[in-house]
Image (cartoon, rainbow, N blue to C red):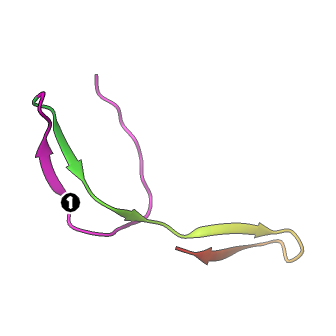
Amino acid sequence: MNDTITIMGFIGNDPGGNTTAGGVPVVNFRVGSSQSRYDAKSQTWIDTGT
């Protein structure tokens, strides 16, 4: 089984590879992304932090 996901953000560290006890390769990394909210009064998106 292969799954594909799309992650948008900023890589927080260098990706590191490992193998599970069952022999499945995995990659570990941290991702940061900005939060946004829609302000109906100004009709704009506002970034509220990471």
Disc 1 crowd, CA 10 A, few/some/many (<14, 14-19, 20+): few
Q: Quadrant of residue 9?
A: bottom left
Residue 42 locus on image (x, y percent): 85, 77
Q: Quadrant of residue 12?
A: bottom left
Q: Residue at x 19, y 42 (%)?
A: 26
Q: Secondary structure at mark 1?
A: loop
- The number of callouts visible is 1
Residue 48 lies, with reference to residue 16, above or below; the image says below
> Is 31 left, or right, of 49 in this rendering?
left
Q: Residue at x 14, y 51 (%)?
A: 17
Look at 16% across and 57% down and name the residue there. Answer: 16
**Range shown magenta:** 1-22
Q: Quadrant of the N terminus?
A: top left
The dominant secondary structure in magenta is loop
Q: Is residue 8 above or below residue 6?
A: below
Q: Position of residue 43 (x, y in %)?
A: 83, 71
Q: Where does residue 49 sit, x and y in percent of width and height?
A: 58, 77
Does 23 appear above or below 11?
Answer: above
Residue under the image location 11 percent in, 32 percent down: 21
- Residue lying furthest front: 21
**Residue 14 vs residue 8, the one in the foreground:** 14
Tell which residue pokes out farthest to the right in this image.
Answer: 41
> Which residue, given by chain and number where applicable, does mark 1 sit on?
15
Is 47 displayed left or right of 27 in the figure?
Answer: right
Direction from residue 33 to residue 41 in the image, left or right: right
Amino acid at circle 1: Pro
Residue 35 horizontal side relative to residue 13, left or right: right
Q: Quadrant of residue 30?
A: bottom left
> Magenta stretch containing residue 50, yes or no?
no
Q: Is residue 9 magenta?
A: yes
